[in-house]
Image (cartoon, grey):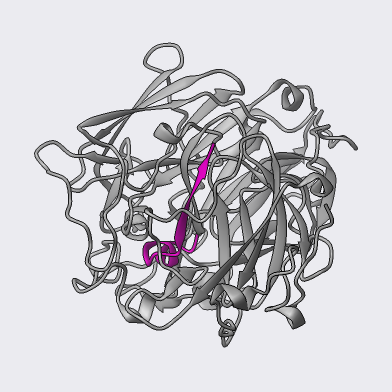
Amino acid sequence: MAVVVISRRRLLGLTAGGIAVAAAGLTLPRLAANGEPGALLRTARPLPPAYRVPLPVPPVLAPVRPDHYEITQHVADLAIFPDVRTPAWTYGGTFPGPTIVSAAGRRIVVRHTNRLPEPVVVHLHGGHTPHDSDGYPGDLLLPPGVGPMPSMPGMPAMPGTIATGTRDYTYPLDQRAATLWYHDHRMGFTGPNVWRGLAGFHLVHDDEEAALPLPQGERDIPLMITDRAFDAEGRFRYPAVDPEMPGVTAAYQNGVLGDVILVNGAPWPVLDVRRAKYRFRVLNASNARRYRLLLAPGAPFTQIGGDGGLLPAPITQPALELAPAERFDVIIDFAAFPPGTQVDLVNTLGAGSTANIMRFRVTGPPVRDDARIPAVLSRSASLNPATASVTRDFLFQNSAGPIGWKINGQPYDPAHPLAYPKLGETEIWRFVTDLHHPIHLHLDSFQVVARNGSGPGPYDHGWKDTLDLYPAQSAEIAVRFTDYAGRFVFHCHNLEHEDMAMMADFVTR
């Protein structure tokens, strides 16, 4: 079938089937005053100094027995500031949590134990996972002695299973090598729970990736970038939950931004690098903040992968733009810099303290570097949009009312899934936005077909699970859900938008 796209000028134009978007009862989106979402929450104490703390690398989690892992979620005090401790909600006592390293196609089980004061849900973001282990927002893991939480005012009752104390998550990992991450996904509380520290990496490797001469070992480094704000005692600041409705107070409903940039949990850290190629798996794990990353002095990034794994071929990127939940797998070659050079990773979408991310210090003479960037990285098959069996339209918009973030005119209601895709069939999903929304699909990655009637954007290459959409923009993706029948969700990954009901169920069958 032919793919019909919606341009900015035809935002309420016809769908591929000839039915006007307006006929679905949708209204013209309101445009944002600027392209960046969120409100700044300032730290109430002197900010920690930049470029003083070495970059931490999250520890790799050892299995308790072959293919079985255990993580206890509990409160731990973190040394983010030099003079005070920050209580955090953690996976295993660290932020980020421990990194899980897995082999594609090898089933693993991760047992989570909840020793936090509230229920949690664990979602493996980017995982091709059965519905009962996907981290559906209603599949709660309660701490011992805590009963099920009542439904929040204005929100429907959540389906889902309840476990107390421990829950086993089974991950078949029938998927490509990719940089995944796991984080909390509790309905209405994802924003505060992730802000408190519930996030970690999960790296999947396969034979195709292993055959490539890419940087390895200590030169293959995950970078989790987040922003946070702190109170006078060094504790995480986050807006209070309004008891009259779900989500955060009105001033922060478009997203919470902090003024301290953390990389792997450290404020503006520094990494000593040799004059060689390094692989960085860059993740934007912020609640709402977007980043446009540059190297100063100027040097390009060589992008080799994205959300869903390796690209077909490397791409030279002068900058990287990351919305919340997006990942970019890049190579930086430090061989061109003389010893003693300080290379800063900066954020041109930030100002003041948020304009800086971290620093690389180039040390020593050139080293033997056998790493190369092959012209061909992956031969993964692509989806053919012409074979799509159906086109579905979804409008992400803000509207009047106590729950303003909606998809197709309705806030989240699990009783009314918005799609029933058939397993194994290619579909076109068309998204239209009013404001800025990073859109995430569970279960399977997708490929971007077009934006505003043109081809994919500069950061749309390869397989993705999160699509960064600008205000008043349309985009089309090709997706094919496979293997697992059941209930899944798609939503905005601005976590405050998600908590304020910008989410919908889809049911595969």
Please give the name of the residue rendered at 78% of the width and 66% of the height, measured from the top-left corner: 5
The answer to which image quadrant residue 498 occupies is bottom left
Specify start and end residues of the magenta stretch as a single range. Answer: 493-509
* Residue 341 appears in the picture as rendered: no
Q: Quadrant of the C terminus?
A: top right
**Position of 164 compared to 230: left or right?**
left
**How many circles with numbers are drawn on the protein?**
0
**Position of 250 compared to 148: left or right?**
right
| Most distant residue in the top direction | 66
| Most distant residue in the bottom direction | 33
Please give the name of the residue rendered at 13% of the width and 36% of the height, measured from the top-left corner: 144
Coordinates of residue 214 in the picture (x, y in percent) = 76, 32
Q: Is residue 175 above or below residue 272?
A: above
The answer to which image quadrant residue 503 occupies is bottom left
| Most distant residue in the right direction | 375
Coordinates of residue 3 in the picture (x, y in percent) = 81, 58
* Residue 428 appears in the picture as rendered: yes
Coordinates of residue 182 in the picture (x, y in percent) = 45, 41
Q: Is residue 212 above or below residue 419?
A: above
Please give the name of the residue rendered at 74% of the width and 56% of the height, measured from the top-left corner: 460
Please give the name of the residue rendered at 42% of the width and 22% of the height, measured from the top-left corner: 109
Coordinates of residue 100 in the picture (x, y in percent) = 48, 30
Q: Compare residues 424 and 499 and report the one nearer the observer.
A: 424
Residue 177 falls within the magenta-colored stretch: no
